Amino acid sequence: KSGAIVPLAPITGWGGVENPEMLDVYVFPGADNSFELYEDDGLTTDYQQGVFCVTKFTLQDGIFTIHPATGSVNLIPATRTYRIHLRGVDENTIQNASGEYNPQTYTYSIKPFILSSNQACSINFNFKESK
């Protein structure tokens, strides 16, 4: 769906509740949207007292942004590796990032990068819908 932002963590074993050090984020351009990734300790009910962290992702006017984490940032890794995948796009989509294009899936995968929990990152792209 246009505008969808889908963060996925690597597969873990049964019962794995750790907040991930790496995220694959699939972005489906074509409409503006936002997504808030909610993370808590995965073990207690401390979230009921406001002990949780939120990382906001936005897609607006051809700019995808990962915002700094807010809340209890000690619950998430100090740094996190992101792999951004723009789905359903033309090969010449990206203006300010390097990566690889897969013509079979119309996906531009940006080279993985690391952000601190207090950092932001914006990726500008020219959206031209592919087949």
Image (tube, grey):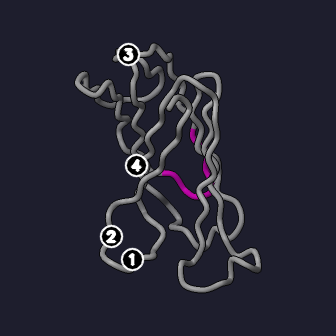
Which of the two labelled residues, at mark 4 and mark 2, occupies the earlier sequence position?
2
Magenta span includes 78: no
Q: The residue tagged with tag 2: helix, strand or loop?
A: loop
Q: CA distance from mark 1 to mark 4?
A: 17 Å
Q: CA distance from mark 2 to mark 1?
A: 6 Å
Q: Is residue 51 above or below residue 60?
A: below
Crowdedness of circle 4 by 10 Å Cα count: few (<14), some, many (20+)?
some
Q: Which mark is residue 24?
A: 4
Q: CA distance from mark 3 to mark 4?
A: 21 Å
Q: CA distance from mark 2 to mark 3?
A: 33 Å
Pointer 3 residue: 130
| Quadrant in the picture for residue 30 | top right
Q: Disc 4 residue type? A: Asp
Which of the two labelled residues, at mark 1 and mark 4, occupies the earlier sequence position?
1
The foreground one among 99 and 45 is 45
Q: CA distance from mark 1 to mark 3?
A: 37 Å
Which of the two labelled residues, at mark 2 and mark 3, occupies the earlier sequence position?
2
The foreground one among 45 and 101 is 45
Q: Disc 2 residue type? A: Thr
Which of the two labelled residues, at mark 3 and mark 4, occupies the earlier sequence position?
4
On the image, the x and y values in percent for residue 15 come to 38, 80
**Chain part drawn in magenta:** 115-121
Residue at 61% over, 62% down: 38
Image marks 2 and 1: residues in contact by CB distance under 8 Å: yes
Residue at 61% over, 46% down: 35
Pointer 1 residue: 16
85 on left or right of 69: left
On the image, the x and y values in percent for residue 87 come to 40, 30
